[in-house]
Image (cartoon, helix red, strand yellow):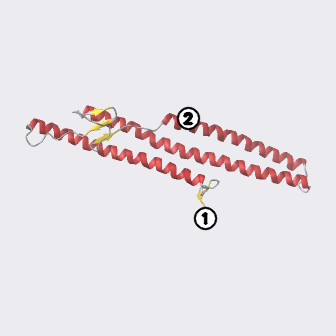
Amino acid sequence: MSHNSTYQANAINTEFGADLSGIQAHIDDLHRIAAVLLINLEDFGGVKDRIYYDLPSTSDSGSAALQAIEKYTAELEDSYNDVNTYTGYNQKLYDSLSAVKPELESILSDAKTGGLDTSEYVIYKPEDPGDGASNSDQTTYQGKKAIYDSLKDRSSTIRTTETTACTTFRNNCELIFQSLIDLVVGKARYLH
């Protein structure tokens, strides 16, 4: 059987394009960033305590210093919370996509085991031998067609999982970057 392209309407593509190790490395980097932010946040707390005890808050310089520290502490805390929220979104993406890869590999393996024509990551729909085919050829075709249809359903289900994971990740990131989520409390902000 000849197949002119790696994708046809009557084919199942089982190629997995996500870079799970890259996503995991990104998550690890985000954890390191969050740890540094937390250390800095704790350091600001110590500075605030020293200023509070060393400079009277009633003096202009003491009051100004405490206000500056409060401002920077709040900004640092917001950054820390942003990184943790973004890390959580990446982790959910990783977890969801981790289920996709083995299922696509299993679909391809089952196709090969079932005697379907494959090429790299593509599974081809069996060709109907036609009305003049022998009973044996028809039976073989019906068996392969049933396997193909089952694999197509599995592929559709797992591709929906993959699409949902990517769409959810993208939508969550858009909410962060558009500042539609108050990351401190994790709830949507209503814009008036």
Can you name the residue that lies furthest to the front here? 4
Vertical position of residue 172 compared to residue 39: above or below: below
Q: Write the residue at 32% across / 35% down.
A: 108
Q: From the top left corner, tell me how far across and down residue 65 is, in percent.
A: 85, 51
Tell me, for residue 67, which label it has, or none.
Answer: none
Q: Which residue is found at the position 54% from the left and 47% from the top?
A: 89
Of 187 and 125, the residue lying toward us: 125
Q: Residues within 10 Å of mark 2 (few under 14, many from 20)?
A: few
Using the numbered discs, state the Cα–Cα distance from disc 1 to disc 2 in whole angstroms: 35 Å
Q: Which amino acid does label 2 sit on?
A: Ala
Residue name at image x 33 percent, y 43 percent: 155
Relative placement, left or right, of 172 versus 80 is: left
Q: Earlier in the sequence, mark 1 or mark 2?
A: 2
Q: Would you say the residues marked 1 and 2 are in contact, meaning their CB atoms lie under 8 Å apart? A: no
Counting from the top left corner in percent of width and height, residue 179 is at 61, 56
What secondary structure is found at the residue carrying circle 1?
Answer: loop
Extreme residue in the bottom direction: 192
State the image quarter where residue 34 is shown: top right
The residue shown at (37%, 38%) is 103
Q: How many marks?
A: 2
In this rendered view, identify the residue nearer to me: 38 or 111: 111
Residue placed most toward the observer, 130 or 5: 5
Would you name the residue on which mark 1 appears?
191
Residue 14 location in percent, x, y?
35, 38
Q: Which mark is residue 25?
A: 2
Other-residue count near label 1 (Cα within 10 Å), few / some / many at <14 / 14–19 / ≥20: few
The three-letter code of the residue at mark 1 reads: Leu
Give the vertical position of 148 relative to 115 (above or below). below
Q: In this view, does 65 lie to the left or right of 74?
A: right
Q: Is mark 2 on a helix, strand or loop?
A: helix
